[in-house]
Image: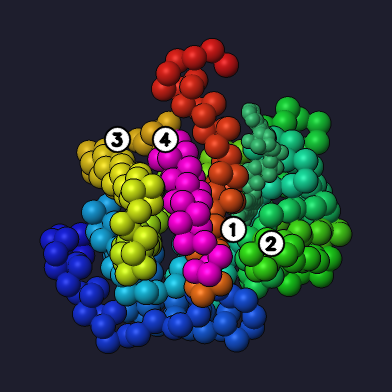
Amino acid sequence: MTDLLPTDFRAELRSWLAEHPPPTVHVAANADDTAMLREWQRTLAAARWVGVHWPVEYGGRGATLAQVAIYNEELVRAGTPPLLGRAGISLVGPTLMVHGTEAQRVQWMHRILDGTDIWCQLFSEPGAGSDLLGLSTKAVRDGDTYRVSGQKVWSSYATYADMGIALVRTDPHAKPHQGISMLAIPMNTPGIEVRPLRQITGDCEFNEVFFDNAAIPARNLIGPVNEGWSVANTTLANERGASFIWREQVLYELAMQKLLAITRSSGLARNPVARQKLAQSWIEIELFRLHNAQTLERLTRGEELGAHSSIVKLFWAGLSQRFYDQAVNLLGLNALLNDSGWLEGFLTTRANSIMGGSSEIQRNIIGERILGLPR
Ligand SMILES: Cc1cc2nc3c(=O)[nH]c(=O)nc-3n(C[C@H](O)[C@H](O)[C@H](O)COP(=O)(O)OP(=O)(O)OC[C@H]3O[C@@H](n4cnc5c(N)ncnc54)[C@H](O)[C@@H]3O)c2cc1C
């Protein structure tokens, strides 16, 4: 498939989407919605429209970066929900490709694509977020198993996840980055308790996860024991990489069009102050598009993104919050009550400057690695 021209790829996907209407639910708020989203992923996977950037040998299409951008754009324009198994597709699969054993890849990779196994990421802890080296959940070898005890937090999708990719401390006496390992954890293991955390939006996307002497097969170790820190860097590089931005770009372009339509039809767009605000939002979304075009060009040339991905993450986090601040400001209470999308966007985007590396951390990276400022 790699030899397909982008337009062929787009046409093939577009016609497939026209024949396969997506589900109307977008959030896995309950068991029925979760089942529906799982089924949607299964349908996409059956036509090889999940993990398109994965190599063909692992069930992907070996899609180019331009095709990945097109893929996300078409999915958003068709109104499809985010994939339920996105953590597995974007984080776990790429980690297994580099660090997994053949047996692990055979066991898990295809189940990630078709949504049989939904994965969650079990990295953050109450005492370890920006600085993951502070993690203290421990795993003690006991015959063919590791006994895991401790607590994770902010674990997105853990309530319905079948598997978790976890960082655990296997050598408490080694230097912090040398005693960490990565384990694949079946979430139905006795001794694991998931407690949902209700967010300001009313959803329970993330959770606390408690481990009490949970027995995890030692064969579930991903990469060598005590070398989980370098394995995790593969995972985090994929998390902070570029894949999410194509979807976000189209989402903001569509939201901007909607905002313009509402303000035009209500007459608000004739107000000079409102016009300034609308123009400001439009300019920011255009800047985001240009940043993304530059990212795509760099990746296409085979360049590592490195600290550049911090600029994109930082800009997107600020843009998303400023866009919804402006929208809420412009539309006022009535519009908010008539269309909960604006309020939900306003509330949800508060998290964008925290997740996947906070804005302060991104500024540190930009300051030190791009501007050459002292630590
Ligand atoms: C929506 C959402 C989903 C998430 N999903 C997951 C998930 O699925 N799995 C998972 O493992 N984690 C997840 N997280 C956790 C996320 O990775 C952490 O919240 C993030 O890394 C920040 O860690 P923390 O919350 O512990 O804050 P802390 O690290 O305690 O930081 C607190 C404050 O101090 C600032 N700060 C910290 N260190 C520095 C520094 N060196 N210089 C300047 N300022 C600093 C931070 O910017 C922040 O403002 C999620 C978070 C969110 C918001």
Q: Residue furthest right?
A: 212
* Residue shown at the point (54%, 49%) measured from the top left: 352
Badge 1 element? helix
* Residue shown at the point (63%, 60%) measured from the top left: 156
Which residue in the protein does label 1 denote?
347
CA gap, disc 4 and disc 2: 27 Å
> Ligand 1 lies in which image quarter?
top right
Please, what is the three-letter code of the amino acid marked with disc 3?
Glu
Magenta residues: mostly which secondary structure? helix
Q: Nearer the viewer, mark 4 or mark 3?
A: 4
Of labels 1 and 2, earlier in sequence is 2
Q: Quadrant of residue 63?
A: bottom left
| Crowd tier of the residue under label 1, counting other residues whose Cα lies within 10 Å: few below 14, some 14–19, many 20 or above | some
Q: Is residue 148 left or right of residue 42?
A: right
Q: Is residue 193 visible?
A: yes
Of labels 2 and 3, earlier in sequence is 2
Please, what is the three-letter code of the amino acid marked with disc 1?
Leu
In this picture, is 262 found above or below 177? Answer: below
Q: Residues at badges 1 and 2 in contact (C-beta under 8 Å)? A: yes
Q: Quadrant of residue 62?
A: bottom left
Residue 185, percent from left and from top: 68, 61
Magenta-tinted stretch: 310-336
CA gap, disc 1 and disc 2: 9 Å
Of labels 1 and 3, earlier in sequence is 3
Q: Nearer the viewer, residue 226 or 317?
A: 317
Find residue 303 and name its label.
3
Please, what is the three-letter code of the amino acid marked with disc 4?
Ile
| Residue behind label 2 places its C-beta within 8 angstroms of ligand 1 | yes
Badge 2 element? loop
